Amino acid sequence: MSGTHLAIKRAFEARRKLQEELRGLYDAAEADKRELSADDRATEERMIRELGEIADKEIELVELAEKESRAAEYFAASAAAGATAAREQETEKRHLGEVLRDIAEGKNGGNPVRVELRDDVALVAGTATDGAELVETELSRSLVDFLQEGVGVLQARARVLVTQSGNPITVPTVTSHSTIALEGETDTIARSAPQFSTVQLDAYKYAVLVQASRELLQDAAFPFVPFVVEQATEEIARKISADLTTGSGTGQPQGVDLATTNTATSAAVNAWTADELIDVFHGIVSGYRQNAVWMLNDSTVQAFRKLKDGDGQYLWVPGMAAGVPDTLFGKPVVTDNDVQALGTGNESVIFGDLRRAYMVRIVGGMDVARSDDFAFDTDLVTWRFVARADGALVDERAVIIGSNA
């Protein structure tokens, strides 16, 4: 076992021990039929903070292990082929818009990107001369940047893991803790071990072909090519966004609103009261509430903006400066129309610390290729857009879903 893998194992064991201690704290209070004391609350906050720090370290170690694995494979292949170390050369990067335009129009223009228009081979991103040249640093970042700006789950601070390969990643999770009981002096102590599971992050493929006639490219009265690139990127991001929120987990990402059994229910089929939202707010432990975020459909936002307290004061607090989000009960609100609207049985409220609860995996960035030969007989120019992503819940206690009756 490598040093990195050993460190991952130790971090996991440390997290498991902390989770067991935290569970013991709750069980002790429950057994005594009492609320957590001030000292208990301080201990709880400390443990949750340490759990978050360990989780961050685990992610860093997983990324490092993947890099080490790729490096080992590369050097093994080089040794077998008798090749020397690959020579890398840094070239000055131009503006992202210029890179996108040149790629889409089939130009080189002095960039480190070389587009090869061929009909006799399949362009494969991992094969030199057959597509690897299309994956450029700035271009790979374009999809990730758009996702960060426009996707509700990511605006709600879900953890993002960007990998260069699409190999499955297994993340360990704790499903239950030991049950503690009071035992008499000579009683046989009951056995109760914590239970574990894993969450696998795959790399689901989102793709589209866009074709345009050569006449349209030549005669369009507006910059058609940049528009094609931008709209394809945005539409792929929107599809990924929808799946990260409502995906079934079968053949697509596991959406955050379908991944947890921690729920609260309103009395009305199309409304929430302030008291019911307070129950949602306290549906996760206080340590997770510190960085929690609301995720709501825009129509739900409209309804919640009208909620008032007993003194007639609005509960909703608008952000008072650019970039400052609106808040509800002091917590930021993210508007995501992929969250279900108010309605019978709908899961219309998502609240939690998504950085702890949910992980998003993105492979590289956007892969864009152009071919003038794919539809040669119809004189159509073809662009191919491909992105790979996945998402899964990793800590169910950090998020709660509010459902209408």
Image: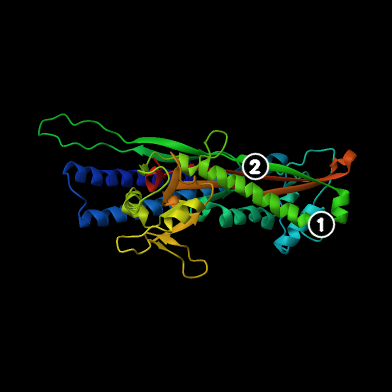
Mark 2 secondary-structure assignment: strand
Q: Whole-percent x and y of residue 64?
A: 53, 49
To which residue does mark 1 refer?
A: 108
Image quarter for residue 110? bottom right
Report the coloring of the rendering.
rainbow
The residue positioned 77% from the left and 41% from the top of the image is 123
Q: Whole-percent x and y of residue 269?
A: 41, 42
Query: Label 2 to label 1, Cα distance in Å?
Result: 26 Å
Q: Between 42 and 57, which is closer to the camera in this rendering?
A: 42
Q: Between 2 and 228, which is closer to the camera in this rendering?
A: 228
The residue positioned 61% from the left and 45% from the top of the image is 239
Query: Which residue lies most toward the left here?
Result: 185
Q: Residues within 10 Å of mark 1 (few under 14, many from 20)?
A: some
Label 2 amino acid? Tyr
Q: Between 305 and 81, which is closer to the camera in this rendering?
A: 305
In-image side of 343 versus 239 (left or right): left
Q: Quadrant of the C terminus?
A: top left
Q: Between 250 and 160, which is closer to the camera in this rendering?
A: 250
Q: Whole-percent x and y of residue 265?
A: 36, 42
Residue 127 in view (yes/no): no
The residue positioned 82% from the left and 60% from the top of the image is 109
Image quarter for residue 31? top left
**Foreground label between 2 and 1:** 2
To which residue does mark 2 refer?
A: 206
In-image side of 316 versus 180 (left or right): right
In-image side of 306 versus 202 (left or right): left
Query: Which residue lies most toward the top here?
Result: 188
